Image (spheres, rainbow, N blue to C red):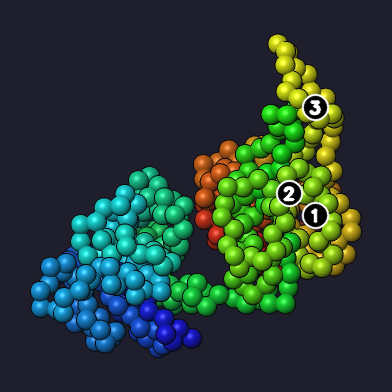
Amino acid sequence: MLTNYNVLLGISGGIACYKSCEIVSRLKKLGAGVDVIMTKNATEFVSPLTFETLSARPVVSDMFDREREWEVEHIALAKKADICIIAPATANVIAKFADGIADDMLTTTYLALKCPIIIAPAMNTNMYENVAVRENLDKLRARGVTVVDCAEGRLACGDSGKGKMAEPVDIVGKVAEILCPKRDYEGKRVLVTAGATRENIDGVRFITNRSSGKMGVEIAKAVVKRGGEAVLIKGLTQIDIPSYITKVVEVTSTRQMYDAVMENYVDCDVIIKAAAPSDYRPATEIKSKLKGKRITLDLVKNPDIAKAVGEVKGDRKLVIFCAETDSLIESAKGKLIGKNADVVVANDVTQKGAGFDSDTNIVTILTRDNRTVSYPIMSKSEVAHVILDEALK
């Protein structure tokens, strides 16, 4: 399953090091090549010889080892890796990753990585719940790092609580999920809207909102990664669109987005409304610049794109978003019914890590079959896959 993939396993100094032996064993059985970097503290728990025997490759721990063939080791290992796992990841090494500190082979290699990264924290419950550790993990998530969170149970120190490293089978499963993603959207076409729209007031001013388009673009990317075809209808964004998203329709105003959606939805299996179209527009657009001490705007309602799709969608799945500052769940339930949607992705934009221009999001998903699931802070890439999972149910 993982044949021809190279996995870099970083091991920092915690008692959970012994579980890392099973990680190497499982990866090898799946056909992966495994390189291991150990911190000096990690070698106090498990001998490097153990990992060399399991991986059939030399273990790296000393930045200045002169007995090996000369190579800029941390760069070579970083370039070679298709994915990197840090397991266990102690509070100390997590802090170093978050702050860009490079003072040993593991942290130096980490900064040179361009591949996906998985971190499996392991520490005492009180340490895990410390605000500094939580903030450092959030920083890493925001940078695209996948965190396989701790489990609850009895810890080596005798305490009980959250802090145990995730089981090797779950960590290796996450590796397989990232390197060999689902192809469950093969043969499906998904329409995704992204970004803000703009309504002109006069020749120089306009109405818009804070949507960055990041969420919608991540959804479109995830569709393609899972074998589907994405039709991206893009309002205002500053995001580079990857070339593998082959159909991109650029729009400016809400009415243009409405026309583009109604023109393209017919050939799609799923419609995901992640854009933030302006609800109102000036009743009259003036070409010249308005002047005066006081300007009064007469606003009229723009078409409700989600509701329009809900009225004609037939057997297609409709996923809509609900961004609120209060009464989140009540508003989401109202939109679910009022717009004839199948899934509502609700988020409170006042929460830290859930704002429009953030790289992360905190969502609650409500479905037509009366399910409500709340998720912790995740990268928008992770949220995109959660949404696609729901759209297939």
Element under disc 1: helix
Front residue of 150 and 281: 281
Measuring 25% from the left and 68% from the top, which residue is drawn there?
74
Q: Position of residue 43 (x, y in %)?
A: 18, 71
Q: Position of residue 333 (x, y in %)?
A: 76, 48
Identify the residue shown where x is 64% and y is 55%.
216
Tell me if label 2 and label 1 are in contact, CB under 8 Å.
yes
**Residue 19 location in percent, x, y?**
32, 75
Tag in front: 1 or 3: 3
Residue that carries the numbered disc 2 in the rendered image = 251
Residue 260's disc is 1
Report whether residue 99 is seen. yes
**Figure quadrant of the C terminus:** bottom right
Is 71 placed left or right of 275 in the picture? left
What's the residue at 86%, 51% (across, down)?
Answer: 308
Residue type for callout 2: Val
| Type of the residue with mark 3 | Ile
**Residue visible at 29% across and 72% down?**
77
Would residue 118 appear left or right of 310 to someone viewing this image? left
Question: Residue tagged by mark 3?
Answer: 286
Mark 1 crowdedness (10 Å alpha carbons): few <14, some 14-19, many ≥20: some
Q: Is residue 383 left or right of residue 276?
A: left
Q: Label 3 to label 2, Cα distance in Å?
A: 20 Å
Disc 1 residue type (three-letter): Ala
- Mark 1 and mark 3: span between their CA atoms? 25 Å
Q: Earlier in the sequence, mark 1 or mark 3?
A: 1
